[in-house]
Amino acid sequence: MLSTTPLQRPLPTATSSFSLANTGNFAASLHSVACSFSAVIWFGSDVLLLLAGEMKKVDQRLKKMTKEKKTNGIREESGEETKRKRKERERDNGEEDRN
């Protein structure tokens, strides 16, 4: 026999995922995730800026070292030339003293 009473559906409870009471928790958790994500991006961008600054400093140091190395090479060559000229002068002076 058919019943004449309408079918009863269970009412939403606080544990139901469709409950209005849980939308606040969902919004709060979504907000928390969004804040965490933005914090990670913000921190990551700071780290990238720091790394870029350090790389620029390293690049400047390398350029400076390269310039110093080139300069030292020139100084060594000029120093060798000076030593050779000094030896030639001493040899010439020694020959003049003997004459």
Image (cartoon, helix red, strand yellow):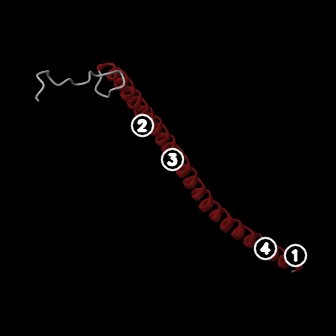
Q: Is residue 31 above or below residue 83?
A: above
Which residue is label 1 attached to? 97
Q: Determine which residue is flagged by label 2.
A: 41
> Any mark on residue 87, and which?
4
Work out how far the residue at label 3 is from the one at label 2, CA to CA, in angstroms: 22 Å
Q: CA distance from mark 3 to mark 1?
A: 60 Å
Coordinates of residue 71 in the picture (x, y in percent): 61, 59
- The residue closer to the viewer here, 33 or 72, is 33
Q: CA distance from mark 3 to mark 4?
A: 46 Å
Please rate how many residues cluster around mark 4, counting C-alpha atoms within 10 Å: few if below 14, some from 14 to 19, many from 20.
few
* CB atoms of marks 3 and 4 within 8 Å: no
Residue 28's image quarter? top left
Secondary structure found at label 3 = helix
Percent x, y for residue 8? 20, 23
Hey, what amino acid is under mark 1? Asp
Give the residue at mark 3. Answer: 56
Label 4 to label 2: alpha-carbon separation:
68 Å
From the image, which quarter does the C terminus lie in?
bottom right
Q: Are marks 3 and 2 in contact (CB under 8 Å)?
A: no
- Looking at the picture, tell me which residue is in the foreground, 49 or 73: 49
Quadrant showing the N terminus: top left
